[in-house]
Image: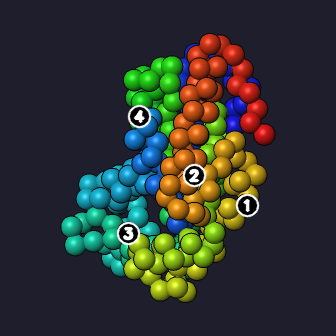
Amino acid sequence: MSAERSGRGPLRVGLTGGIGSGKSTVAALLRAHGLPVVDADEIVHELLAPGGAAVPPVLAAFGDAVRAPDGGVDRKALGRIVFGDAAARRRLEAIVHPLVAEASRERLRTAAERSPGGVVVYDAALLVETGRYEEFDRLVVVTAPREAQIARIAERDGLSRKEAEARVAAQMPLEEKVRLADYVIDNGGPPEKTAEQTRHLVRRLLEDAAALAAGLPLPKRK
């Protein structure tokens, strides 16, 4: 993170975590506190929807097995392929990541124009893996126990335990992301605890944004 940056402009915050850690829950809480959040998964949905920029190259790479009836990409079918095959996952990432990066940077610019002295948040599961976390002033990592991750994604995506375990195993270990984090939200407890941590996080981020707006260097948080 660019902890030594100083000068005008909004505080750029990257929000990430492991699959099933509850990152989307924290993103929703940040929105409820009035912070603008750009959602990478939302961008991916648009890219894979009918007419999306990623549809032709993805269908060319993976064939009719991932073609949805509406002409877009069947994300569940695609997920079954890439989560079980590292080479296929890398092939998909090579197609999708540049498109997501381009779209997200444009949306972050728009959000920054509307919040010049405030905070803008980018919610992305693979922020660390892609190296894009270095574009942000603060990195927030949402964590949860592995068993909670498995249970959540099995219920959310209609997966067997074995399938859910494979998806967790395919991710970068949360511990590696935590080592890079400026702030960590533990989402392994009751919702009230997550909400309390998020309120505290918002206060800290607004303090950081005020320092940046005043032309001061951002304090190191570790």
Please state which of the two labelled residues, at mark 4 or mark 1, is closer to the viewer: 4
Please state which of the two labelled residues, at mark 2 or mark 3, is closer to the viewer: 2
Please state which of the two labelled residues, at mark 4 or mark 2, is closer to the viewer: 4
Q: Earlier in the sequence, mark 4 or mark 2?
A: 2
Q: Earlier in the sequence, mark 1 or mark 3?
A: 3
The residue sitting at the left extreme is 70
Q: Earlier in the sequence, mark 4 or mark 1?
A: 4
Q: Residues within 10 Å of mark 4 (few under 14, many from 20)?
A: few
Q: Earlier in the sequence, mark 4 or mark 3?
A: 4
Residue 41 visible somewhere in the drawing: yes
Expressed as whole percent of the image width and height from the top left, the position of residue 19 reads 54, 65
Q: Foreground: 110 or 48? A: 110
Using the image, determine if residue 189 lies above or below residue 203: below
Distance between mark 2 and mark 3 Cα atoms: 21 Å
- Hey, what amino acid is under mark 4? Gly
Residue shown at 24%/66% (left/top)? 71
For mark 3, what is the residue? 75
Residue shown at 63%/72% (left/top)? 146
Residue shown at 42%/77% (left/top)? 155
Q: Foreground: 43 or 149? A: 149
Using the image, determine if residue 186 lies above or below residue 148: above
For mark 2, what is the residue? 16
Which mark, residue 175?
1
- Hey, what amino acid is under mark 1? Glu
- Hey, what amino acid is under mark 2? Thr
For mark 4, what is the residue? 34
Expressed as whole percent of the image width and height from the top left, the position of residue 75 reads 38, 69
Quadrant (top left, top right, bottom left, bottom right) of the N terminus: top right
